[in-house]
Image: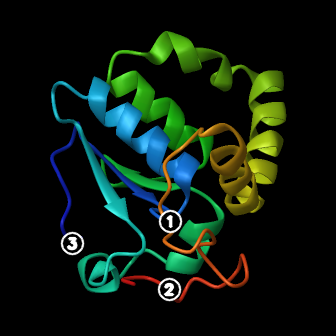
Amino acid sequence: MSNYMSNNELTIFYDGNCPLCTLEMEKLKRYDKKNLIKLENLHQDNFTVLYPEIDVDKAMHILHGLYQGKTLLALDVTHRAWSLVGKGALVAPLKLPIIKQLAHQGYLLLAKYRQPISQCLYQRFGIGIQTCDEGTCYEKPSNTHHRGK
């Protein structure tokens, strides 16, 4: 395994060109007083060198994390991250069977359309972080080859 942290730490691989994703990661890190979370932007130039075992295209479709040698996906990453920073009570319902299924479907929908949703929220309401110089991060939502602009 490359570039991994200790057993109690979580590495999160996120879309750094997504304003809402970036806002969420910055908020999470503000609560990370014990420095238990490492954030890795999928768009950094050397990502595939640092993490050759992470499929960037898959990670662009669903949030990936590494914790205790295991790959976590989607809301399992979110639950683990917020639990590590002492905010587990806020995300505890994500582990309840019915809520977990509904939340996962909602997550998949949000993840699929995160670029237009986050751009709209930023442009109209100032919610999120502007991460794209020209107002769009990709010519097409599935175009992931703009890492390291």
- Mark 2 vs 1: CB contact within 8 A: yes
Q: Eyeballing the image, is 133 above or below 14?
A: below
Q: Eyeballing the image, is 29 above or below 60?
A: above
Disc on the earlier residue, 3 or 2 = 3
Quadrant containing the N terminus is: bottom left
Q: Position of residue 61 (x, y in %)?
A: 65, 66
Using a 10 Å C-alpha cutoff, classify the residue at mark 1 as few (fewer than 14 neighbours), some (14 to 19) or many (20 or more). many
Does 10 sit left or right of 124 as displayed? left
Q: Residue furthest bottom?
A: 145
Q: Position of residue 80 (x, y in %)?
A: 44, 33
The mark found on residue 123 in the picture is none
Indicate the amino acid at tag 3: Ser
Disc on the earlier residue, 3 or 1 = 3
Label 2 SS: loop
Q: CA distance from mark 3 to mark 2?
A: 23 Å
Does 85 sit left or right of 35 as displayed? right
- Residue where numbered disc 3 is placed: 2
Does 7 sit left or right of 75 as displayed? left
Indicate the amino acid at tag 2: His
Q: Position of residue 7 (x, y in %)?
A: 20, 42
Label 1 SS: loop
Q: Quadrant of residue 37?
A: top left
- Residue where numbered disc 1 is placed: 17
As rendered, which of 59 and 131 lies closer to the eye?
131
Q: Quadrant of residue 2?
A: bottom left
